[in-house]
Image (tube, rainbow, N blue to C red):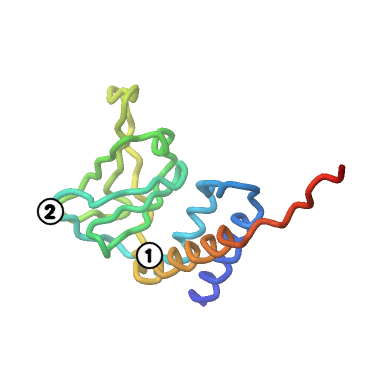
Amino acid sequence: MKRLLSVLMLAMVMTVGLGACSSTPRATPAERLAFYEAHAGEPVRSFRLFGRLNGWTPLGNNALVVWTRPNEAWLLDVTSCQDLQFAVSISISNFANTVTAGFDTVTPHGPGMSQVGRIPCRITQIRPIDTRALNQSREEIREANSETRTDPPPAENPPAN
């Protein structure tokens, strides 16, 4: 089932890529969310967070992916977080190096974002990401886009005099 979702997502991304004229459009937050959801496992109660995040990706106002290690990522669903997609950095609350759904929060940070009166975004669900399958899908998409770009352009007929 997960493989079928990956193939469907790959087909959707390729369709968007093939429909572009001369440049590849950036995927919308909803398309990126669908891509990560296709590689997410069943919800878990919590995950361990030692030190800093290795990276993060906003997926609209209600979700983000956090990378705790190069090969470990988590899809977090959050309550509506208006500034998430414009944030430069985030902080995640945790107790004893454990981030727990329903208890911990994500707070976006960035220029022009006042921290006074800011309400943190509660984490409502945590799902592990299959990073191996995710990276494989990304590579397949890159290869498909590369093949699309290497096709020679159609021959043009010289103007008749």
Name the side, left or right, on which 39 lies relative to 46. Answer: right
Location of residue 83 (image quadrant): top left
Judge the density around disc 1: few (<14), some (14-19), many (≥20) Cα neighbours within 10 Å: some
Q: Name the secondary structure under disc 1.
A: loop
Which quarter of the image is occupied by the C terminus?
A: top right
- Looking at the image, which residue is at 61% across and 47% down? 22
- Looking at the image, which residue is at 36% across and 62% down? 127
Location of residue 154 (image quadrant): bottom right
Location of residue 46 (image quadrant): bottom left
Image position, residue 33 (x, y; %): 48, 54
User: Viewer-proximal residue, 151 or 106?
Assistant: 151
Give the label on residue 28, or none: none
**Residue type, label 1:** Pro
Image position, residue 50 (x, y; %): 14, 55
Image position, residue 26 (x, y; %): 52, 46
Q: Name the secondary structure under disc 2.
A: loop
- Count of number-bearing discs: 2
Image position, residue 141 (x, y; %): 50, 63
Residue 11 lies, with reference to residue 159, above or below; the image says: below
User: Viewer-proximal residue, 76 or 35?
Assistant: 35
Alpha-carbon span between mark 1 and mark 2: 21 Å
Residue at numbered disc 2: 96
Marks 1 and 2, the one that precedes in the sequence? 1
- Looking at the image, which residue is at 54% across and 70% down? 5
Residue at numbered disc 1: 43
